[in-house]
Image (tube, helix red, strand yellow):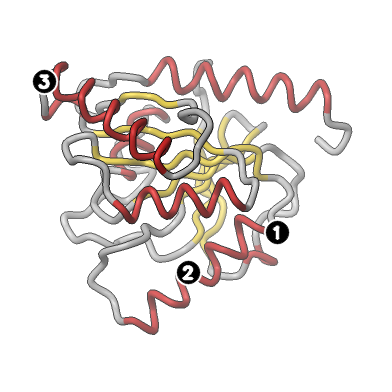
Amino acid sequence: MKINTAEFVISNSDVSKCPKDFLPEYAFIGRSNVGKSSLINMITNQKKLAKTSGRPGKTQLINHFLINNNWFLVDLPGYGYAKVSKKTKSIFQEFITDYFETREQLVCAFVLIDIRHEAQTIDIEFMSYMGESEIPFCIVFTKADKISKVKIDSHVAAYKKKMFANNWAEMPHYFVTSATESTGKEALLSYIDEVNQEVFKNNAQF
């Protein structure tokens, strides 16, 4: 897939105010400071589509971007560590949960994980929530340029082991990416393109 247009549409904290267009949506979410904005800018060929910041927790709203006029990329607030109050975190959690559990246009979520670190409990718990809620998702390992290929393989293997220990029958589909080197860009966009083709062909709602 080639991205020709990427347009910001709306930011809000109320799922009922999300775009009414019935187009496929792909949500990007991960712990704060996982490199989400950089990844979004990389795959959309934009430098400033998603706001990057050295301060974790910068994204605090549901952000919709219309891609190629036929699908939405949705940038969601990070879970876990963020320099915000407990009250604000609870509000984040509420509208993130509302989005995942009520948004009919969502066809796949991408859960971003920093490949530099060993399996984190908070990531496993979040993916368990996704699995239990029957929300389709893939894992996107980020910042692959920061460590060696050997460490990448060992950290992915560690995630597989931990997920199997948490009653997963198999590892979700995953991608290894680097926003700096554009690693994984083609694989990620090809996957979205394939899913879109299936969605438009088999789902009368779209």
- Residue at image location 64% in from the left, 24% down from the top: 195
Q: Is residue 19 left or right of residue 27?
A: right
Pick the front one: 70 or 133? 133
Residue 156, x across and y down, in percent: 29, 28
Classify residue 196 as left or right of residue 175: right
Q: Going by the picture, which residue comes out furthest to the right?
A: 204
Query: Which residue carries the number 2 mark?
Result: 93
Q: Amino acid at mark 3?
A: Ser
Q: Nearer the viewer, mark 1 or mark 3?
A: 3
x then y, percent, for residue 22: 76, 44
Residue marked by disc 3: 148
- Residue depicted at x 81% and y 21%: 201
Query: x and y percent of residue 34 in the render?
Result: 26, 46
Query: Which image quadrant is residue 26 in?
Result: top right
Q: Which mark is residue 102?
A: 1
CA distance separating discs 1 and 2:
14 Å
